[in-house]
């Protein structure tokens, strides 16, 4: 799980919360923080996993890798668009 988070941790702080839902299930939230108030809110969109500990263990790393990749891709796209708009202005 932390291996998959490393690329995102290079860009921003990530908060993790873990809560017990009932006797058999937990919820894990992955919440990236925004670097600036004016940064696009989509870059701070949380990811949530719910299930038994075994289910969360089995799925979290794979899904987290996809989430981090997409978050970084969005960040890069937004930065490119801003640079193009600044250059055009």
Image (tube, helix red, strand yellow):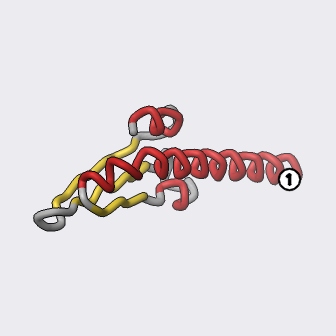
Q: How many marks?
A: 1
Identify the residue at image location x=50%, y=48%: 36
Q: Left or right? Give the position of 86 relative to 25.
A: right
Q: Left or right? Give the position of 53 relative to 47.
A: left
Q: Secondary structure at mark 1?
A: loop
Identify the residue at image location x=39%, y=53%: 31
Identify the residue at image location x=81%, y=53%: 85
Identify the residue at image location x=18%, y=66%: 21
Q: Which residue is mark 1?
A: 89
Looking at the image, the residue that sits furthest to the left is: 23
Screen quadrant of the N terminus:
top left
Toward the viewer: 24 or 9? 24
Q: Position of residue 49 (x, y in %)?
A: 35, 59
Q: Left or right? Give the position of 16 relative to 81.
A: left
Q: Position of residue 13 (x, y in %)?
A: 41, 40
Q: Position of residue 67 (x, y in %)?
A: 52, 52
Q: Residues within 10 Å of mark 1 (few under 14, many from 20)?
A: few
Residue 5 image-quadrant placement: top left
Looking at the image, the residue that sits furthest to the bottom is: 22
14 up-or-down from 50: above or below = above
Q: Position of residue 66 (x, y in %)?
A: 55, 50
Toward the viewer: 54 or 3? 54
26 up-or-down from 15: above or below = below
């Amino acid at each position: 799980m932390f291996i998959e988070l490393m690329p995102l941790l290079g860009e921003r702080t990530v908060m993790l919360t873990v809560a017990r839902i009932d006797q058999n299930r937990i919820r894990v939230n992955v919440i990236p923080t925004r670097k600036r108030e004016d940064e696009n809110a989509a870059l701070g969109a949380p990811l949530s996993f719910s299930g038994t500990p075994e289910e969360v263990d089995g799925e979290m790393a794979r899904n987290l890798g996809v989430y981090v990749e997409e978050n970084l891709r969005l960040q890069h796209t937004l930065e490119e668009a801003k640079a193009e708009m600044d250059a055009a202005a």
